[in-house]
Amino acid sequence: MKHMKRYTGLKIAGFIALGVGFVILLGFGIMMLWNWLVPELFNGPVINFWQALGLFILCKLLFGGFPKDHDKGGWKKRKWERMQAKMEHMSPEEKEKLKSHFDRCGWGKRWQPEEGQTTERQPE
Protein backbone atom coordinates (compact mmCIF):
# COMPACT_ATOMS: atom_id res chain seq x y z
CA MET A 1 0.00 0.00 0.00
CA LYS A 2 2.88 2.38 0.73
CA HIS A 3 4.15 1.75 -2.79
CA MET A 4 0.84 2.94 -4.22
CA LYS A 5 0.90 6.15 -2.13
CA ARG A 6 4.42 6.91 -3.27
CA TYR A 7 3.50 6.16 -6.87
CA THR A 8 0.43 8.40 -6.63
CA GLY A 9 2.52 11.24 -5.22
CA LEU A 10 5.01 10.88 -8.06
CA LYS A 11 2.18 10.78 -10.56
CA ILE A 12 0.66 13.98 -9.19
CA ALA A 13 4.07 15.68 -9.16
CA GLY A 14 4.59 14.57 -12.77
CA PHE A 15 1.26 16.02 -13.86
CA ILE A 16 2.04 19.29 -12.11
CA ALA A 17 5.45 19.43 -13.80
CA LEU A 18 3.84 18.72 -17.20
CA GLY A 19 1.26 21.45 -16.59
CA VAL A 20 3.91 24.01 -15.66
CA GLY A 21 5.99 22.98 -18.68
CA PHE A 22 2.97 23.34 -20.95
CA VAL A 23 2.19 26.84 -19.64
CA ILE A 24 5.82 27.90 -20.13
CA LEU A 25 5.91 26.54 -23.69
CA LEU A 26 2.56 28.16 -24.46
CA GLY A 27 3.70 31.54 -23.13
CA PHE A 28 6.99 31.47 -25.02
CA GLY A 29 5.25 30.27 -28.19
CA ILE A 30 2.74 33.11 -28.10
CA MET A 31 5.49 35.61 -27.29
CA MET A 32 7.70 34.42 -30.15
CA LEU A 33 4.84 34.47 -32.69
CA TRP A 34 3.70 37.92 -31.58
CA ASN A 35 7.21 39.37 -31.63
CA TRP A 36 7.89 37.80 -35.02
CA LEU A 37 4.70 39.00 -36.74
CA VAL A 38 3.06 42.00 -35.08
CA PRO A 39 5.96 44.52 -34.90
CA GLU A 40 6.86 43.94 -38.54
CA LEU A 41 3.35 43.76 -40.01
CA PHE A 42 1.49 46.33 -37.90
CA ASN A 43 4.27 48.33 -36.20
CA GLY A 44 2.98 46.99 -32.89
CA PRO A 45 4.89 46.63 -29.62
CA VAL A 46 7.22 43.80 -28.63
CA ILE A 47 5.82 41.85 -25.65
CA ASN A 48 7.41 39.81 -22.86
CA PHE A 49 6.49 36.37 -21.47
CA TRP A 50 3.97 37.62 -18.89
CA GLN A 51 2.23 39.84 -21.40
CA ALA A 52 1.95 36.85 -23.74
CA LEU A 53 0.29 34.76 -21.01
CA GLY A 54 -2.04 37.64 -20.23
CA LEU A 55 -2.91 37.94 -23.91
CA PHE A 56 -3.69 34.22 -24.06
CA ILE A 57 -5.98 34.43 -21.02
CA LEU A 58 -7.71 37.50 -22.44
CA CYS A 59 -8.30 35.76 -25.79
CA LYS A 60 -9.57 32.64 -24.01
CA LEU A 61 -12.06 34.72 -22.04
CA LEU A 62 -13.20 36.76 -25.04
CA PHE A 63 -13.29 34.09 -27.73
CA GLY A 64 -13.07 30.67 -26.10
CA GLY A 65 -15.23 31.19 -23.07
CA PHE A 66 -15.97 28.47 -20.57
CA PRO A 67 -18.06 25.31 -20.99
CA LYS A 68 -21.71 26.26 -20.66
CA ASP A 69 -22.87 22.97 -19.15
CA HIS A 70 -19.99 22.33 -16.75
CA ASP A 71 -22.38 21.67 -13.87
CA LYS A 72 -24.27 18.97 -15.82
CA GLY A 73 -21.31 16.78 -16.73
CA GLY A 74 -20.47 18.67 -19.91
CA TRP A 75 -18.26 17.00 -22.48
CA LYS A 76 -17.66 13.91 -20.32
CA LYS A 77 -21.37 13.14 -20.31
CA ARG A 78 -21.68 13.64 -24.07
CA LYS A 79 -18.60 11.49 -24.67
CA TRP A 80 -20.03 8.69 -22.52
CA GLU A 81 -23.38 8.91 -24.34
CA ARG A 82 -21.58 8.57 -27.71
CA MET A 83 -19.68 5.55 -26.39
CA GLN A 84 -22.91 3.92 -25.21
CA ALA A 85 -24.51 4.51 -28.63
CA LYS A 86 -21.52 2.85 -30.33
CA MET A 87 -21.65 -0.10 -27.92
CA GLU A 88 -25.35 -0.71 -28.66
CA HIS A 89 -24.58 -1.26 -32.34
CA MET A 90 -21.67 -3.67 -31.81
CA SER A 91 -22.00 -7.35 -32.54
CA PRO A 92 -21.36 -9.82 -29.71
CA GLU A 93 -18.00 -10.73 -31.29
CA GLU A 94 -16.94 -7.07 -31.37
CA LYS A 95 -18.01 -6.60 -27.75
CA GLU A 96 -16.00 -9.66 -26.68
CA LYS A 97 -12.95 -8.42 -28.60
CA LEU A 98 -13.20 -5.02 -26.89
CA LYS A 99 -13.66 -6.67 -23.49
CA SER A 100 -10.59 -8.87 -23.99
CA HIS A 101 -8.60 -5.76 -24.97
CA PHE A 102 -9.61 -4.03 -21.75
CA ASP A 103 -8.84 -7.19 -19.75
CA ARG A 104 -5.26 -7.11 -21.08
CA CYS A 105 -4.95 -3.43 -20.13
CA GLY A 106 -6.18 -4.05 -16.58
CA TRP A 107 -9.52 -2.32 -17.08
CA GLY A 108 -11.60 -5.50 -17.23
CA LYS A 109 -12.28 -5.61 -13.50
CA ARG A 110 -14.00 -2.24 -13.71
CA TRP A 111 -16.51 -3.60 -16.20
CA GLN A 112 -17.46 -6.68 -14.21
CA PRO A 113 -20.05 -6.07 -11.49
CA GLU A 114 -19.38 -7.44 -8.04
CA GLU A 115 -21.54 -10.22 -6.76
CA GLY A 116 -25.01 -8.93 -5.89
CA GLN A 117 -24.74 -5.82 -8.07
CA THR A 118 -26.71 -5.28 -11.24
CA THR A 119 -25.22 -3.89 -14.44
CA GLU A 120 -28.18 -1.63 -15.16
CA ARG A 121 -27.96 2.01 -14.19
CA GLN A 122 -30.43 3.55 -11.83
CA PRO A 123 -32.46 6.45 -13.33
CA GLU A 124 -31.27 9.84 -12.14
Image (spheres, grey):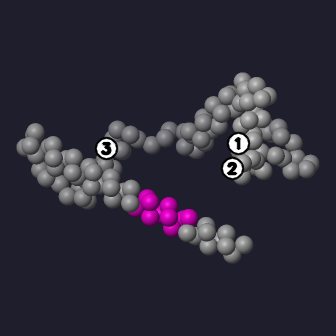
Task: Please say if 4 is above or below 45.
Answer: below
Task: Please say if 103 is above or below 15.
Answer: above
Task: From the image, tell me which residue sits under label 1.
Answer: 101
Q: Are marks 2 and 3 in contact (CB under 8 Å)?
A: no
Disc 3 marks a residue whose amino acid type is Cys
Task: From the image, tell me which residue sits under label 2.
Answer: 105
Magenta residues, start to end: 11-20
Q: Position of residue 122 (x, y in %)?
A: 80, 39
Q: Position of residue 42 (x, y in %)?
A: 10, 40
Locate residue 74 relative to residue 22 in the image: left or right.
Answer: right
Q: Earlier in the sequence, mark 3 or mark 1?
A: 3
- Marks 1 and 2, Cα distance to the nearest angstrom? 6 Å
- Quadrant where the N terminus sits is bottom right
Q: Is residue 80 magenta?
A: no
Residue 54 makes an appearance in the image = no
Q: Badge 1 local density, few (<14 within 10 Å), some, or many (20+)?
A: few
Task: From the image, tell me which residue sits under label 3.
Answer: 59
- 105 or 124, nearer to the observer: 105
Name the residue located 71 percent from the left edge and 44 percent from the top edge: 102
Name the residue located 36 percent from the left edge and 44 percent from the top edge: 61
Name the residue located 15 percent from the left edge and 43 percent from the top edge: 37
Locate residue 48 relative to residue 53 in the image: left or right.
Answer: left
Q: Badge 3 local density, few (<14 within 10 Å), some, or many (20+)?
A: few
Name the residue located 14 percent from the left edge and 43 percent from the top edge: 38
Locate residue 47 relative to residue 121 in the image: left or right.
Answer: left
